[in-house]
Image (tube, rainbow, N blue to C red):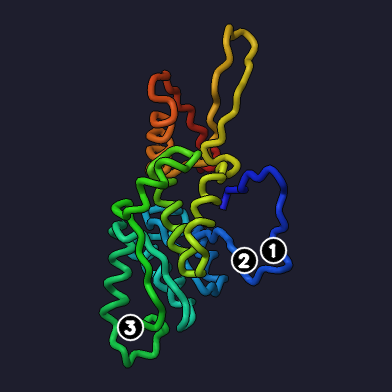
Amino acid sequence: MGGQPRFRVVPRLVPRSSAILVIESDEWNASFLNYWPKIIVLTNIEMEHLDYYKSLNHILKTYKEFISHLPRNGVLVTNGKDKNILNIKNQISKLPRSRTSSLRGKQFKIQKFSSGQDETRKLREILRIPGEHNILNALAALTTARVLKIPDRISFKSLSKYRGAWRRFEIIEADLRGLTRKITIVSDYGHHPTEIKATLKAAREKFPHKKIWCIFQPHQYQ
């Protein structure tokens, strides 16, 4: 979980007029198996939470079980270039149609997104948050919005106004005692090696000519 969208006005968690609830599910301790969504968005799958998972196969097996929670009219929105997601997708496509599992062939739709899409250039121009990972996140959001029949003009307008989430490349201007000038602090919850790498790449993109220091807090280390 770990992210709270930054809004100028605090919205209702569930608008009274909306039938849609969006949540960020968490694979730690397989807690996402408590959910039975109509749409699942998978951006990537990696070796993580190894205090619970025993291996990559254990992780993939758990994700496959999560995907099996989709109803017959459900939609799986996936990163079309993530190798572990492709692994699961290939396993699903090879299941016999006569099998009783809810993962059997074509019971739900699969919608892919990737940075090779034509929309990527426009997203690079309008997004206010840096990083290639945020381009992919925006493509995932755009793909999901299309599944929900939301017009692109609304999606692009919303994405152009998105200011990020709390502790996700959150920029803080700090005036620290003893320093002759202000420094920029970026607070980010990323703790997985891939997340840290993505955050540092985003920092270089945002501040191409500044010296960057990375301070890592292993606060969950045991």
4, 137: nearer the viewer? 137
Secondary structure under badge 1?
loop
- Provide the residue designation for mark 2: 21
Q: Nearer the viewer, mark 3 or mark 2?
A: 2
Question: Which residue is at 39% across, 60% downward?
Answer: 54
- Provide the residue designation for mark 1: 14
Q: Position of residue 220 (x, y in %)?
A: 53, 42
Q: Position of residue 197 (x, y in %)?
A: 38, 38
Label 1 packing within 10 angstroms: few (<14), some (14-19), many (20+): few
Q: Amino acid at mark 1?
A: Val
Label 2 packing within 10 angstroms: few (<14), some (14-19), many (20+): few
Q: Quadrant of residue 67?
A: bottom left
47, 126: nearer the viewer? 126
Q: Quadrant of residue 105?
A: bottom left
Q: Amino acid at mark 2?
A: Leu
* Distance from the alpha carbon under mark 3 to that under mark 2: 27 Å
Secondary structure under badge 2?
loop
**Would residue 152 appear left or right of 193 to someone viewing this image?**
right
Secondary structure under badge 3?
loop
Q: Are marks 1 and 2 in contact (CB under 8 Å)?
A: yes
Question: Given the current orientation, which residue lies at the most extreme front position?
Answer: 153
137, 153: nearer the viewer? 153
Tell me if residue 158 can be seen: yes
Q: Earlier in the sequence, mark 3 or mark 2?
A: 2
Q: Position of residue 48 (x, y in %)?
A: 42, 52
* Distance from the alpha carbon under mark 1 to that under mark 2: 7 Å
Tell me if residue 55 can be seen: no
Q: Amino acid at mark 3?
A: Gly
| Residue 105 numbered tag | 3
Question: Which residue is at 37% across, 68% downward?
Answer: 111
Q: Earlier in the sequence, mark 3 or mark 1?
A: 1
